Amino acid sequence: MCWRCGASRHPYAFYCATCGVHCEAPAPPTSCSDITRSVSCTVPRQASATAAPSPDPGPVVKSAPPTADQCTQTVGLYYPSATELHRKDQQRALQLSRQQSTRDRQPPLTAISPGRGYWRKQLDHVYAHLRSYAQNNAPFRTLLGEPRLGRMVSAAIHEDVHEVSLTISFVSVPREEQQVKGIQLLKELAPGQGEISIVQQLLDQGADPSCCGSDGRHALAVAVVNGHHDLLPVLVQRGADVDQQSGQTKNTALHEAAALGSEGLQCAEVLLSCRANVRRRNAAGQTAYDVAVSSGCNNMASLLAARTGLDLLDKLGKRSEPRRFLTNTLD
């Protein structure tokens, strides 16, 4: 109770809620007898306080909710610095700007162009519909991809009741020189020809070492059929594919050499030295060894069989190397 006005107050309140005078808190108990005495003494006071209600009750102290300790594992977490975050933002912005600059501008595909002098929108309309037509029409894509176009020289528009025709003319880049050189190379690989210096000169001038003749055979196959085994390394070094298939039979140069029998033995040896694939199959599903057996040449069959066995041994050796290493390590 307050020592001045006698009003009831909270035992641990520093000021009286009625008169505002400073109140001292009760002294803490020093022994068990003090605790028993304080409890016995406070009971009648509380009873008297309940009998005479005070005009202003004391503040109610709310008990705090129970708490529990929680642990968080932070070992191994990486927190980037502000400098690194700034650098990553700069790299992301630079990459986005590069993508936007290199990305082709694709105008929206509209059903009807605006006309009325909006020539930029007209160009976008023509480009969008031309692109869509090419994507949905395979023959047109094939025809469009063949010619080499130069600068545009003229454009004409013709309009009638039903259609609007747009004619665009470009300068055509001729390819006759390269075709002539390819024809000259195939002629030099014909029977009775085959000068190495002339073939090298044609290749230096831009002749394609993988060009094909009218029968569909490429230059390597033509050289094999005509017995020019000394020209095979020259063509391979200049970019000819030693495993290229051509014609309806899909024969490689090694297939052609195997079909010749003993006459193609030198060509087969040169092709094998150029790492020709002995397991490549033609349209009939035959390897070069199968073709050699069909031709009846034992020497050719033995040569191809030996090379096939060497390839298998190489593969088996590569597979057994880890096991051999493990065995030696354990020993």
Image: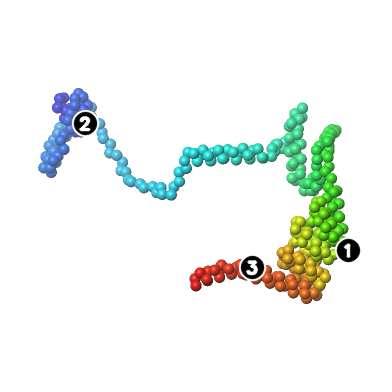
Q: Nearer the viewer, mark 3 or mark 1?
A: 1
Q: Residue at x 82, y 60 (%)?
A: 196
Q: Amino acid at mark 2?
A: Ala
Which is more toward the observer, 254 or 200?
Answer: 200
Q: Earlier in the sequence, mark 2 or mark 3?
A: 2
Residue toward you, 253 or 129: 253
Circle 3: residue type: Lys
Q: CA distance from mark 2 to mark 3?
A: 93 Å
Question: Which one is earlier in the sequence, the residue at label 1 or at label 2?
Answer: 2
Q: CA distance from mark 3 to mark 1?
A: 41 Å
Q: Which residue is mark 3?
A: 315
The answer to whether residue 152 shows anywhere in this view is yes
Label 2 element class = loop
Mark 3 is surrounded, within 10 Å at the Cα level, by few (under 14), some (14 to 19) or many (20 or more) other residues, namely few
Label 2 or label 3, whichever lies nearer to me, is 3
| Of the pair 41 and 175, the residue shown nearer to us | 175
Give the Cα distance between marks 1 and 2: 125 Å
The x, y position of residue 185, in whole percent, is 84, 56
Question: Tag 1: residue type?
Answer: Gly
Q: Quadrant of residue 226?
A: bottom right
Q: Is residue 156 above or below residue 212?
A: above
Q: Quadrant of residue 161?
A: top right
Identify the mark at residue 192; answer none if there is no mark. 1
Q: Position of residue 93 (x, y in %)?
A: 58, 38
Q: Residues within 10 Å of mark 2 (few under 14, many from 20)?
A: some
Q: Secondary structure at mark 1?
A: loop
Disc assigned to residue 13: 2
Is label 3 in contact with label 1 (beta carbons under 8 Å)? no
Identify the residue at image location x=20%, y=23%: 19
Label 3 sits on a secondary structure element that is helix
Which residue corresponds to the image point at 51% horizontal and 69% vertical from the top-left?
329
